[in-house]
Image (cartoon, helix red, strand yellow):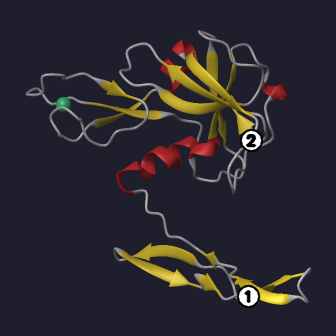
Amino acid sequence: MSSYGQVYVENGKYRLKGDFHHLTPNMPIRDKNDNWRLLGVTNPRDMTYIHSYGGEAVFFESLSKGKLLGTRCENPDCDYKGTAYIPFRIHCPDCLGKNKIEDFTKLAQETGKIHTFMVCERSGAFNALDKPIKFINIEFDGISTILMSYLSLGDPKFGMRVVPIFRTLDPTYTILDLSWVPEGTKASELPEGFSF
Ligand SMILES: [Zn+2]
């Protein structure tokens, strides 16, 4: 069995190791009621996709360290100077300047509130979350945008105070490393691998 593809960067270039495409034999599709006549084939596909985070890499790295980063426009010539964003926006949508990165963990802990929510009983392929999935949109004082995430404990309600939790043990370095629980939840109740 060949190994899955792995990537690191050296001197500004991707270095690839292992196999990024696995060839799996196809299988015939046959009609049981018609003398097992051939109708087609299955085509298994297994590929490793290289997903670059670019300027957002610091956001995902910080989740694994228990920090929620956002950004703020500090361009003095911008009509909307001071506007702050969670989720992380690399550039200001108004002046297109590069935003300044800011640690909003404390703000999220103290002011995070459910704006609206959606409970999904079913999911698409490759879903890694427990069902039903409680998707929540969270608002924060002084932040112009609303963050989409998921509630790990309890049932969502409009205006409910929530606090962020982070998968600091075996992080996936994806947005799933960030989740939320109702304010007042004890550390011992958190899902495995997560901490405040
Ligand atoms: Zn701006």
Q: The residue tagged with tag 1: helix, strand or loop? A: loop
Residue count near mark 2 (Cα–Cα under 10 Å), binned few <14, some 14–19, many ≥20: few
Q: 54 and 124: which one is in front?
A: 124
Asked if ligand 1 lies within 8 A of label 2, the reply is: no
Tell me if label 1 and label 2 are in contact, CB under 8 Å.
no
The residue at which mark 2 appears reads as 122
The residue at which mark 1 appears reads as 26
Q: 164 and 121: which one is in front?
A: 121
The amino acid marked with disc number 1 is Asn
Q: Residue furthest left?
A: 77
Quadrant location of the N terminus? bottom right
Q: Image point 71% across, 53% down: which residue?
A: 170
Q: The residue tagged with tag 2: helix, strand or loop? A: loop
In this picture, is 85 found above or below 13? above
Q: Where is residue 49 shown, x and y percent of the image?
A: 53, 70
Q: Image point 51% across, 43% down: which residue?
A: 62
Quadrant location of the C terminus? top right
Tell whether 194 sits left or right of 176: right
Q: Within the image, what quadrant is residue 119 found in? A: top right
The amino acid marked with disc number 2 is Arg
In this picture, is 68 found above or below 83? below
Q: Quadrant of ligand 1?
A: top left
